[in-house]
Amino acid sequence: MTGHQHNAQLRVGDSAIPVRVRHTRRRTLGLYVFPDGRVEIRVPHGTTREQALAFAAGRRAWLRDTLQALPEPPAPPTYVDGAVHPYLGEALTLRLYCRARRHCRIADGVLHMGLPRPGEPVAVEQALREWYRQRARGLFEERLAHWYPALGLPVAQMPALRIRAMRSRWGSCSSHGGVNLNLWLIRAPLDCIDYVVVHELCHLLEFNHGSRFHAHMDRILPDWRTRRQQLREHQQTWG
């Protein structure tokens, strides 16, 4: 769930580290480091900025070591003929050609993309994003419908799906029962997509990450921890 958030700084050694303080419905404080080096403090509603920073300050050594251990970030993507982009965990090579109307197809590890302006990276990026979005809509809806019955909730309460291009999260669940999934999840293997879908659906039963939430995860998707690690490795490779 997304809550109120604001930015701050925390001094670690000789450096001032930018951090985001995010208020959620969780009951405890948590410190998170993302693969791209962003730092987030997640706190319960009512926690002051000073309390959040004091909590993080008490974990300076862990934060310093974690930031230092981060792998080199992946190279930024390019949008030219021959560039490689992932789709469902498979590395696809772009083959661009001129065509009056946009056309995309996959064959033998190649994404053939016909565009009116194949030599313009911005146009290629926009076309690729739209292709991802079209593929994501159908697949994400199918996976939600596949896993939702395992919750034991009425079919009439099937959550609405929203697809967003998010930077810091693979998915979220709103207090109104809607599920948000990250557009870029379509680039990850199907096992990873299912992990995120089940994770968000379990929030319909437990709106936290406590023991009962994990019990639901264990019941519905027993190997979810392995899938979570697979998703982390995908993110380290592709961003």
Image: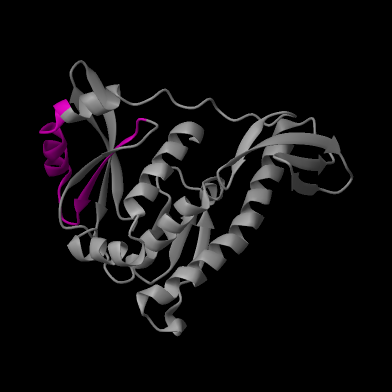
Q: Is residue 45 one of those drawn in magenta? A: yes
The residue sitting at 38% across, 34% down in the picture is 35
Rendering coords of residue 37 (x, y %): 35, 30
Q: Is residue 82 one of those drawn in magenta? A: no
Left or right placement of residue 43 versus residue 113 in this view: left
View extreme (top): residue? 14
Q: Is residue 17 above or below residue 33?
A: above
Judge by depth and name the residue closer to the eye, 15 or 87. Answer: 87
View extreme (right): residue? 100
Structure colour scheme? one colour
Rendering coords of residue 152 (x, y %): 36, 79
Which quadrant would residue 55 be assigned to in this image? top left
The residue sitting at 23% across, 60% down in the picture is 25
Left or right placement of residue 181 versus residue 122 in this view: left
Q: In this figure, what is the number of numbered marks? A: 0
Left or right placement of residue 127 versus residue 187 in this view: right
Quadrant holding the N terminus: bottom left
Left or right placement of residue 105 versus residue 48 in this view: right
Q: What is the span of residues highlighted in magenta in the rendered image?
A: 37-61
The residue sitting at 43% across, 68% down in the picture is 178
Rendering coords of residue 191 (x, y %): 47, 53
Which quadrant would residue 215 be assigned to in this image? bottom left
The residue sitting at 25% across, 52% down in the picture is 23
Whether residue 117 is visible:
no
Whether residue 129 is visible:
yes
